[in-house]
């Protein structure tokens, strides 16, 4: 059993008890309050975790949202004109 398991003897030494909630990280990084409704300001709560592909597809179709995305944006180098030595 690994040290991350709930009953692991060394877990307390690896994972601090006062962990920062993920919602706080998102608020700090993106200024998004994911646990507040953007319309009315009331608290949101997680009702379910949907991971099955068919279920996700059904929900997206029901909501009229796209099923496919264009995929990740291809990487590119920095714009050379902006570099001080590239003139
Ligand atoms: Zn609301």
Image (cartoon, rainbow, N blue to C red):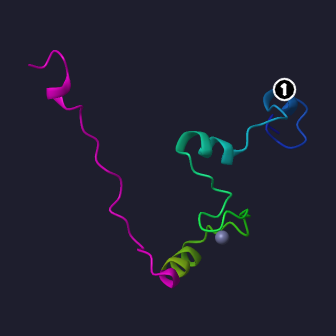
Q: Quadrant of residue 14?
A: top right
Q: Is residue 69 magenta?
A: yes
Q: Which residues are magenta?
A: 61-87
Q: Quadrant of ligand 1?
A: bottom right
Q: Is residue 85 magenta?
A: yes
Q: Percent position (x, y) of residue 37?
A: 64, 64
Q: Residue at x 28, y 47 (%)?
A: 74
Q: Quadrant of residue 42?
A: bottom right
* Mark 1 residue element: helix
Quarter occupied by the N terminus: top right
Q: Residues within 10 Å of mark 1 (few under 14, many from 20)?
A: few
Residue placed furthest toward the front: 40
Q: Percent position (x, y) of residue 36?
A: 67, 59
Q: Percent position (x, y) of residue 51?
A: 61, 67
Q: How many discs appear?
A: 1
Question: Between 15 and 46, which is closer to the camera in this rendering?
Answer: 46
Position of 76 compared to 57: left or right?
A: left
Position of 80 compared to 60: left or right?
A: left
On screen, 42 above or below 8? below
Q: Quadrant of residue 71?
A: bottom left
Residue that badge 1 annotates: 13
């Amino acid at each position: 059993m690994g040290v991350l398991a709930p009953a692991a003897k060394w877990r307390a030494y690896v994972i601090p008890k006062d962990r920062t909630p993920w919602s706080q990280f998102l608020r700090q990084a993106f200024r998004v309050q994911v646990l507040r409704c953007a319309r009315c300001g009331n608290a949101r709560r997680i009702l379910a975790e949907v991971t099955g592909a068919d279920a996700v597809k059904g929900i997206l179709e029901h909501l009229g949202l796209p099923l496919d995305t264009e995929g990740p944006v291809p990487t590119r180098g920095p714009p050379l004109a902006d570099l001080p030595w590239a003139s």
